[in-house]
Image (cartoon, rainbow, N blue to C red):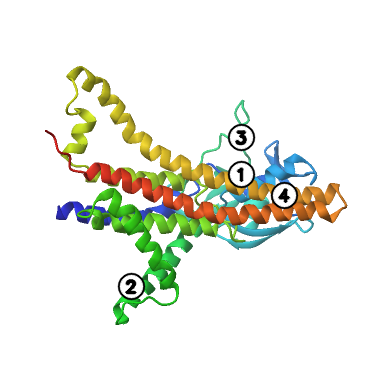
């Protein structure tokens, strides 16, 4: 039991250690230069004979709305807050590019590298940023294509610090500071009354304990799983809230992040599973043996559909919410170009404001559902069954 408990604590620590790594540049993305910035006229890079050219996009077209929305949803190697179409300038800061290609290659992703097709030479090898990916190329930045017009250049293994990774690191630091303050309050205060930010955290901690962990896992075993449940609840909740700020983050809308979270729940459930849990999967008691043979594959499939439902639910809801909100903001720009009446823009603004407030509720709800189902799955794995 002591060994299992230490393993679970290590899994919880690994959650925060590995989350930034899974949200790296190997995730399929569309870069910011394939989408539009929040302006009435923007540019997009279009491949033509291995060179990038700029093509103006009509701000009153549906392509503008689609590209504007994609810019917010997708990850990027350069942290861009906003862009100036007339000056072809993006305002933000460079992020480290970390590649494994016959050794470790590290350099900064400058604005020219990400948005203007500049080739960067590092240790005798040339790299070019193209459609959200980094490819090995020559000094001229040549990109070769197959019959379906997909790049055939070799890609190095990319573990760069992307925009989503920055969001994960920021959330981790904020959670560390918040819970350190909460723990410090309990040590210093004689009556254990929290102060400051700890006063907002304590009710949520108690809520996770009394409404999720205790009812689903049981009074005797819930404490062992509280570190994980608290970690996943507050991490998802905070990341969802950060996605509603002008920082432009969409971490929980990245499927690699939700896959990692669901994977940890899967590991917790199956590492903690007792003999009764495994018996009900492979040889269900109280059922005729022909039915046991039929039910066993179904139960094994259920082991994987549970975490799959967790990752898809979180990813789909956050992505859908952000798409609608950003789409309505883009509609305001379209109306500004096509209609001269300020009332149309005002309607779009009010709808966006309403949906943004609704997204705050969704931010909490998705964290609640993920944590509640995780505790329910863990509880079913550690439950002791009475067989008569």
Q: Residue at x 49, y 50 (%)?
A: 252
Q: Nearer the viewer, residue 78 or 40?
A: 40
Sequence-first disc among 3 and 4? 3
Q: Is residue 11 left or right of residue 72?
A: left
Q: Residues within 10 Å of mark 2 (few under 14, many from 20)?
A: few
| Horizontal and vertical percent position of residue 16 | 37, 57
Q: Nearer the viewer, residue 41 or 239?
A: 239
Give how far apart the Cα atoms at labels 2 and 4 are: 44 Å
Give how far apart the Cα atoms at labels 1 and 3 are: 11 Å
Give how far apart the Cα atoms at labels 2 and 1 are: 47 Å
Kindly tell me whether residue 279 is visible in this rendering. yes
Q: Residues within 10 Å of mark 1 (few under 14, many from 20)?
A: many
Circles 2 and 1: CB atoms closer than 8 Å = no
Q: Nearer the viewer, mark 2 or mark 3?
A: 2
Q: Which residue is mark 2?
A: 183
Q: Nearer the viewer, mark 4 or mark 1?
A: 4
Q: Nearer the viewer, residue 383 or 35?
A: 383
Q: Which residue is mark 4?
A: 330
Q: Which residue is mark 1?
A: 130
Q: Is residue 332 left or right of residue 223?
A: right
State the mark number for residue 144. 3
Question: Is disc 4 placed on a helix, strand or loop?
Answer: helix
| Horizontal and vertical percent position of residue 24 | 47, 50
């Amino acid at each position: 039991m002591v060994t299992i408990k230490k393993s679970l604590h290590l899994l919880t620590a690994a959650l925060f250690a590995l989350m930034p790594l899974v949200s790296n540049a190997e995730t399929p993305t569309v870069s910011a230069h394939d989408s539009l910035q929040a302006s009435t006229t923007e540019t997009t890079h279009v491949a033509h004979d291995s060179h990038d050219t700029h093509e103006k996009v009509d701000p009153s077209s549906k392509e503008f709305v689609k590209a504007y929305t994609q810019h917010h949803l997708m990850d990027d190697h350069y942290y861009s807050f906003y862009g100036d179409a007339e000056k072809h300038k993006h305002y933000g800061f460079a992020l480290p590019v970390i590649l494994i290609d016959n050794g470790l290659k590290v350099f900064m992703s400058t604005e020219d590298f990400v948005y203007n097709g500049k080739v960067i030479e590092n240790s005798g090898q040339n790299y070019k940023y193209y459609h959200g990916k980094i490819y090995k190329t020559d000094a001229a930045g040549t990109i070769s294509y197959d019959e379906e017009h997909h790049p055939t250049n070799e890609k190095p293994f990319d573990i760069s610090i992307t925009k989503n990774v920055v969001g994960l690191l920021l959330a981790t630091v904020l959670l560390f500071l918040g819970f350190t303050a909460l723990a410090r309050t309990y040590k210093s205060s004689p009556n254990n009354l929290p102060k400051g930010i700890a006063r907002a955290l304590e009710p949520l901690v108690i809520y996770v304990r009394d409404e999720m962990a205790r009812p689903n896992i049981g009074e005797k075993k819930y404490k062992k799983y509280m570190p994980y449940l608290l970690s996943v609840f507050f991490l998802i909740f905070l990341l969802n809230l950060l996605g509603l700020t002008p920082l432009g983050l969409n971490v929980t809308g990245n499927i690699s992040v939700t896959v990692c979270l669901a994977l940890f729940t899967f590991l917790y459930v199956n590492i903690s599973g007792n003999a009764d849990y495994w018996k009900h999967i492979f040889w269900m008691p109280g059922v005729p043996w022909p039915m046991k043979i039929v039910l066993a594959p179904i139960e094994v499939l259920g082991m994987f559909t549970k975490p799959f439902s967790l990752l898809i639910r979180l990813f789909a809801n956050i992505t859908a919410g952000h798409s609608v909100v950003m789409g309505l903001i883009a509609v305001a720009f379209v109306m500004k170009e096509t209609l001269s009446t300020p009332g149309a823009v005002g309607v779009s603004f009010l709808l966006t404001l309403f949906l943004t407030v609704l997204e705050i509720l969704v931010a909490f709800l998705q964290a609640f559902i993920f944590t509640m189902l995780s505790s329910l799955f863990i509880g079913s794995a550690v439950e002791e069954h009475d067989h008569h």
